[in-house]
Each structure stands twice: as C-alpha cells, then as structure tokens.
Amino acid sequence: MTTFVLFLTVLLACAVEAVEALTIVLAAGTSRHWGSAWQGTVAALLSLAVTVAVLGPAVGQIPLGALRLLVGALLLVFGLQWLRKAVMRGSGYKALHDETQAYADEVAAASGAAQGGRGRVKDWYAFTLSFKGVFLEGLEVAFIVVTFGDNQHDIPVAVLGAVVAVAIVTVAGFAVRAPLARVPENTMKFVVGTMLTAFGVFWATEGAGANWPGSDAALLVIVPAVALLALGYTSVLRRARTAGTLGTAHSTEGSLT
C-alpha cells in the first residue's frame, strides 16, 4: 500500500466517524448547553487518549501474522456492514442517511430530556450525550489508525490522515453551525466500505499464511473487484425494486378497472 493510499483511506474512514460525532455534539450544544457539551467532548477525548496509550502498545506485541488475521477479520466485519448499507441505500431499499434528520432527531430528544447538572457540569444530559458520541466514534477512529498504521508500519501517516479528517469536519461543521448535510455520506461509506473490505480480504489471507501475487500490488486488483461487485449488486437490486414497484402499480390499476 502506498503512503498516499494509506493516508486517503484513513482520512475518508475517519471523516465519516467525525461527521457522526459532530452531529451529536452540535445537537447537544444547540438544544441544551454549549459549556456542558464542550466538557463532555473534552472528557471523551481525554478518556480516548488514556485508552489508546494503554492499549496501543499492546497491539505492537502481537505477531504480525496473527495481527493481520485478526485485523483482517475485523475489517471485513466493518467493511461489509458499511458496504451493505451503502448498497441498500444506493438501490433504494433503504433510505439515504440524512444528517439533517439525524440532527433534528438528536435535538428533539435532547430538548425533551430532564434538566439538571452535577458538580461543575450544568447540564448532565448534554455532557453525557457529547461524551458518549465522541468517545464511541473516537474509538472507531483509534481502531482505524492503530490497525492500518501498525500493519503498514507507518503510524505517523495514519495519525496524520485522522487528524486532517477530524480538523476538516470540525472546522466545516462549526463554521456553519449545522450538520454536514451536504457531505455525500453514502458515497463516502461506499468508498470506505470497499476499501475496508478489500484490505480485510488482503490481510486475513496473508495472516492465514497465503501470499498474494505481486504482494501489495494485489490491492490494485482486489479494490476494484470489490467495488465492481458492490456496484453490480446495487444495480441488480435497483432493477428488482423498480420491477416490483411497477408490478404493484399495474396490479393496483387492474383492480381499480
């Protein structure tokens, strides 16, 4: 894997997680209390730093073969989940993810929650909402950085990709004080799902003891193959849905006449 591909993959994957975390923080701050939302965000970041500091070095102690098999399997799980959702949304069987609607739902839930604080936190709900959102999405970012960086022996590039992604999303989000509704998240999830699935296949196979022809160059074939397969499924499902809709419409017209 080239340095650029590693950087781009980590950036895109982390950007998706950052958009979701930012949506939660914005909802907590806008509908409840900005100070408490910031406190929850900072507390989550500190907790993440401690978690990564404790668990990060342990990853490097795992034998490379076992690590690639484990990470490959995990990436396949994450990648196929993302790819499945992207295919279902692209074919029309599942509604496109709408950050504006997600933001509105979070605001509605936050507005209806009980008021009250604890200690120096004036709004405990805003604090916990921001904390959980940032910490959980942050764990996924940390997982992406540690696994991709360690497997490619280039942690700095993986960290740089994550930092750039978080910085871009944060600046863009707070500049407009609204969720990043214009971000084509389904497209991003399709791309990231494809990359994670391809890397999962690649690393799990190597971890199992097999060798790919051309080593890392095999990714130049695996990635397009996964993308074409997913696009094929999307096209087939879209046609099936269209045919089913037309069939239902004709049946309805026939019963009315």
Image (cartoon, rainbow, N blue to C red):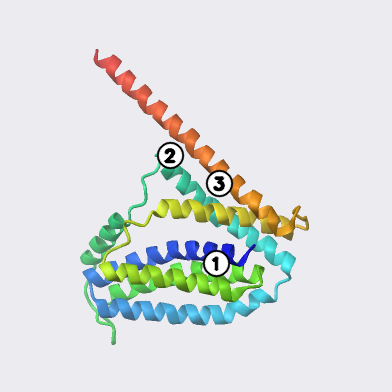
8 w.r.t. 239: above or below: below
Q: Which of marks 3 and 1 is nearer the N terminus?
A: 1
Question: Residue 91 got which mark?
Answer: 2
- Count all numbered tags in the image, as a single digit: 3
Nearest to the observer: residue 160 or residue 207: 160
Kindly tell me whether residue 82 is visible in this rendering.
Answer: no
Mark 3: amino acid: Ala
Horizontal arrangement in the rendering, residue 120 relative to residue 156 (left or right): left
Kindly tell me whether residue 52 is visible in this rendering.
Answer: yes
Q: Which of marks 1 and 2 is nearer the N terminus?
A: 1
Mark 1: amino acid: Phe
Horizontal arrangement in the rendering, residue 116 relative to residue 173 (left or right): left
* Residue 234 on image: x %, y %: 48, 39
User: At 52% across and 38% down in the image, what residue appears?
Assistant: 233
Which quarter of the image is occupied by the C terminus? top left
Q: Name the residue under label 3.
A: 227
150 w.r.t. 104: above or below: below
Disc 3 + disc 1, Cβ < 8 Å = no
Q: What element carries label 3?
A: helix
Which quarter of the image is occupied by the N terminus? bottom right
Tell me the crowding category of disc 2: few under 14, some 14 to 19, or many 20 or more residues within 10 angstroms, Cα based.
many
Disc 3 + disc 2, Cβ < 8 Å = no
Q: Is mark 1 on a helix, strand or loop?
A: helix
Horizontal arrangement in the rendering, residue 15 relative to residue 23 (left or right): right
Nearest to the observer: residue 230 or residue 223: 223
Q: Name the residue under label 1.
A: 7
Tell me the crowding category of disc 3: few under 14, some 14 to 19, or many 20 or more residues within 10 angstroms, Cα based.
some
Horizontal arrangement in the rendering, residue 70 relative to residue 173 (left or right): right
Snapshot quadrant of residue 27: bottom left
